[in-house]
Amino acid sequence: MKRFISPKGIIGLALIILVILAAVLAPLVLPADFATRMSMSARLRPPSAAHWLGTDQLGRDLLYRVMLGGQTSLKIAGAAVVMSVILGLPIGLIAGYYRGHVDNLLMRLVDTLLSFPVLLLALTISAMLGPSLPNTIIAIGVAFSPFIARIIRGEALRVAQMPYVEAARAAGTNDLQMVLRHILPNIMPPIIVQATLSLAFAILAEAGLSFLGLGTQPPQSSWGLMIQASRDYLDVAPWTALVPGAAVAVTVLGLNMSGDILRDVFDPRAN
Amino acid sequence: MTYILNRLLSIALTLFLISVITFSVTTILPGDVATMIMGTQSNPVALAGLRKSLGLEDPLIVQYGRWIGGMLVGDWGHSLIFKSAISELLVQKIKASSLIVVMSMAIALACAIPLGVWAAVHRGRWQDAVSTNVALVGVSLPDFFWGIMMILLFARTLGWFPSSGFADPSVNLWLAVTHAFLPALALGLGLMALLTRMTRSTMTGILGQEFIRVGRAKGLSERTIVWRYALANAIGPVLTVAGLQVGYLFGSIIVVETLFNYTGMGWLTYQALLNRDIPLIQATVFVIAAVVMLTNLVVDVLYLYFDPRIRLE
């Protein structure tokens, strides 16, 4: 029997749990104005007992800022991935189930959308809608949906040719029932794996958008924004860039590593 | 012959779809050129007048026709922020960016192939672990973070390379390369990580094949087997994946060029987006998508050329 859970996956999962805990606990353990409390006398301080990860250019505590930023990043990335699945699922299912002309038409559209680099599409949508938190979610969600649609289509295509689908059809199941009850449940595992991996990309995309000023807007805290703000103080306070950078790295690394575990659990065929 | 014809038809159709998507995203969403020129606080009557004179009151299909018709005859319109012809801007900036794209691709391949081969040859040992984990960290950090770290290390601390700016390669090639080096390195790292993984898995598969065993049985040196026979078979898939990443590169240059203040396509796109210069947004988005689509096509065709096994009937 195959080894079920790899040590890499465990580390990944542990990292993710750590990040989520930090993001959720931040507002519970610290006073409400902690993140915005500025202190001109404590600007750009290196890590110390009072500020474990140092302070930023406005004297705000970096540990707390980075925890709050995690909340924003996870929220946006999670919602964006859910949105991309909602948009991609019907397209992929219809194309994969009906095949033929419908499939050709939809996939032509999807492939064309895939010619647009994800970040470019997300930036354009965000710029046109006007940057804000909900618009960042929409921008990333829409930009990711063609990938999801492509994967779902492939899976639907495979499952739709299974003997049990044939059997269900012979038993008189209609199309809607077929898709919802026989096909969708059987393609959920690869979708879950893909969604987890997309979450990692969504975190990177959010950081990129916010870094360019077309994502999360101040005074909200976001890792991309923190890195952007650190640029002017690199020489004197490199930790202001390293702290949010490390936060992105830990989260994305954790997601990529736990992708392995999910694949083992949900999608044994992949091995 | 019919294959080539089909292909050309398909390119035309895809370019058409790209133009429709670009136009829709930039037109249907709120905000238009008139408000961009006059600002949101402007006199509504004047605004309506300007909208009319710019043709923004026409049906969308007419506006689209005017846009695409202009592009077909080489009139790409004027940029609102740069006050110059978009076509000139594009030619200039594409030249600047191609230097970065080519350099980052070269850096990525030059590091990824040896690393991936090294990992595959020592599969399951520490060398494999090092290479795989380096690759994992590489894909887990955003390009702009690498960029900032490089500015800190190579520009500020060591002073080896300039931290920002662009130099024209036709004026001074060396200066141009030094300016492009750090952005290219920042872009190349993420790509390198991905290509290392790809090289490793392809090489692992090939090293387990029959013809490798035959080579060993004939007494060929391990070096010849790995670097000549195995790598020759692995290079196709690796280059294909590399080619398909051009899209990813064109997304990333927006961030990286902005960070390094390197005035190429990515920087131009960002300026357009930031200032909502709609004609320029339309042009840059269309051109980038078209370049990505055409590159993927070239990769496809090259693959057929290099690997006769999968050539179509």
Image (spheres, rainbow, N blue to C red):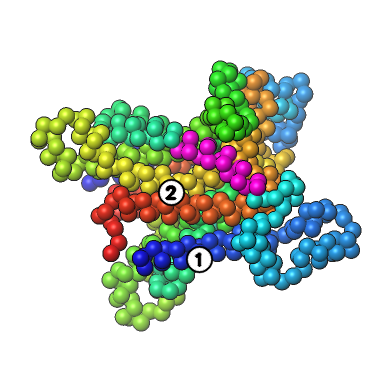
Q: Amino acid at mark 1?
A: Leu
Q: Disc number at residue B13? A: 1
Seen at 28% across and 51% down, the residue is: B307
Residue A229: quarter of image: top right
The residue under label 2 is B244
Q: Chain of mark 2?
A: B
Residue A189 is covered by the magenta coloring? no
| Secondary structure beneath label 1 | helix
The quadrant in which the N terminus of chain B is found is: bottom left
What percent of the width, then of the height, locates residue B208? Answer: 20, 41
Q: Which residues are magenta?
A: B88-105
Q: Is residue A67 visible?
A: no
| Secondary structure beneath label 2 | helix
Seen at 57% across and 53% down, the residue is: B287
Image height check: is A61 above or below B205?
above
Q: Is residue B92 visible?
A: yes
Q: Chain of mark 1?
A: B
